[in-house]
């Protein structure tokens, strides 16, 4: 089967949504499917390459300057560039189906190519491309682009949401059939050599430093735990980087925090293997890939009681879902002070990740793509 994968972000550009797109493509290619990816270019990357197990990757101009930051202009340039690249490609290579990640902006590209070339598309919606999911980030955009997004959802041959929370939020705006297929991970490839508790305990975060991820709450909470021994590894970069550094200095925690900046997905896994607790007090989340990665590497979970985090935590077994920000201190103190409990949680997370096996998830996607490609 020939599959054209459209995704605005693909490692090393962007976050978890691009990573899951890559993982699915790799597994489909291993099963014998022919795949071409059209994604965004970033300075320093090849414009065309054969990678990810023989997959052709075409990176088109987008005026993007930073791996972790995107704007309406870069999205618009990507759509135009990718549209012409898609036209040229499909004139000589006829895909059986299009798989598109992100209704906004990539969905507009899939819709246009589908209409012109009569190729069905499967839409995978992540949380950020659903109206109301991240009002502080995309609220202004959706005020005027929302009417233009309706055909993207309506004309998709099939729509997938990465979590039940994302599905329910999307249904408030788009009256279409939506299925749920969780983000997944190769649980054999991403397995810790051993599960143990480090001394001092290592707490970690991975993601963009932006309001949605609520990184300042991390520092404010841990400042109340200065009487305990711990260290914190912060993986990621973004517009709040300077504020994060200032907040760390404000509480004199420079010797406790390590800021590694923007890292590769492989480096995320490497750091998770050396950590004990994932602490992410996010304000909104779909089904975060870093959360699934944390499960696979056997981390105890201390996360906000929102969105897709609910799918990742068995309360009191492998982690805690927090509603009140003051409770972060309470549960972290409990885990830091009780290595036996932390070890139990870590082992439970490794068991929990079996629900998110990438092989099972790719089988569901493969079935969907075959179904929409049949006349």
Image: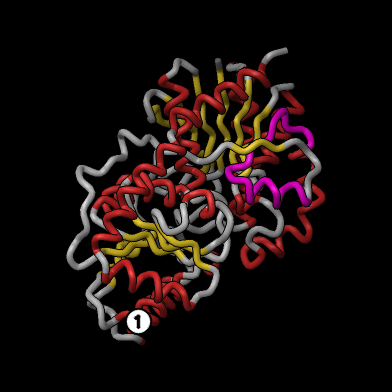
Q: How many marks?
A: 1
Callout 1: few (<14), some (14-19), or many (20+) C-alpha neighbours within 10 Å? some
Q: Secondary structure at mark 1?
A: helix
| Quarter in which the C terminus is drawn | top right
* Residue drawn at 29 percent across, 85 percent down: 252
Q: Classify residue 111 by image quadrant.
A: top right
* For residue 226, above or below residue 363: below
* For residue 364, above or below residue 288: above
Colour scheme: secondary structure
Q: Position of residue 219 (x, y in %)?
A: 39, 76
Q: Is 340 on the left-hand or right-hand side of 374?
A: left
Q: Position of residue 159 (x, y in %)?
A: 68, 35
Kindly identify which residue carries mark 1: 223
* Residue drawn at 73 percent across, 34 percent down: 112
* Residue drawn at 25 percent across, 44 percent down: 192
Q: Is residue 354 visible?
A: yes
* Residue drawn at 32 percent across, 66 percent down: 335
Q: Does the segment drawn in magenta span residue 110?
A: no
Q: Does the segment drawn in magenta span residue 158?
A: yes
Q: Position of residue 143 (x, y in %)?
A: 77, 61
Residue at the top extreme, as displayed: 375
Q: Is 314 on the left-hand or right-hand side of 252?
A: right
| Residue in front for this viewpoint, 35 or 234 | 234
Q: Which residues are magenta?
A: 154-172
| Quarter in which the N terminus is drawn | top right
């Amino acid at each position: 089967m020939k599959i054209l994968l459209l995704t605005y972000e693909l490692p090393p550009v962007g976050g978890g949504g691009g990573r899951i797109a890559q993982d699915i493509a790799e597994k489909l290619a291993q099963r014998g499917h022919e795949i071409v990816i059209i994604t965004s270019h970033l300075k320093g990357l090849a414009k065309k390459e054969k990678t990810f197990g023989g997959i052709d990757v075409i990176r088109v101009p987008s005026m993007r300057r930073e791996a972790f930051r995107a704007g309406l202009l870069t999205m618009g340039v990507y759509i135009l560039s990718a549209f012409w690249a898609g036209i040229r490609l499909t004139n000589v290579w006829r895909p059986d189906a299009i798989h598109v990640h992100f209704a906004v902006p990539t969905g507009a590209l899939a819709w246009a190519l589908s209409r012109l070339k009569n190729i069905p598309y499967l839409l995978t919606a992540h949380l950020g491309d659903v109206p109301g999911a991240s009002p502080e980030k995309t609220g202004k955009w959706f005020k005027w682009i929302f009417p233009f997004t309706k055909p993207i959802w309506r004309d998709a041959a099939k729509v997938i949401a990465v979590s039940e929370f994302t599905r329910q939020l999307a249904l408030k705006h788009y009256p279409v059939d939506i299925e749920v297929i969780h983000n997944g991970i190769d649980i054999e490839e991403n397995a810790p050599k051993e599960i143990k508790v480090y001394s001092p305990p290592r707490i970690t975060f991975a993601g963009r430093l932006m309001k949605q991820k609520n990184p300042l709450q991390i520092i404010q909470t841990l400042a109340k735990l200065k009487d305990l021994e711990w260290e914190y590894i912060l993986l990621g970069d973004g517009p709040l980087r300077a504020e994060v550094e200032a907040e760390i200095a404000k509480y004199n925690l420079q010797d406790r925090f390590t800021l590694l900046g923007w890292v590769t997905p492989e480096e995320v896994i490497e750091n998770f293997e050396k950590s004990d607790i994932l602490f992410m007090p996010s304000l909104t989340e779909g089904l975060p890939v870093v959360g699934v990665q944390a499960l696979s590497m056997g981390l105890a979970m201390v996360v906000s009681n929102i969105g897709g985090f609910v799918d990742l935590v068995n309360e009191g077994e492998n982690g805690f879902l927090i509603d009140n920000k003051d409770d972060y201190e309470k549960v972290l103190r409990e885990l830091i002070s009780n290595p036996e409990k932390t070890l139990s949680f870590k082992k439970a997370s490794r068991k929990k990740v079996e629900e998110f096996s990438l092989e099972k998830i790719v089988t569901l996607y493969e079935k969907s793509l075959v179904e929409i490609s049949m006349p």
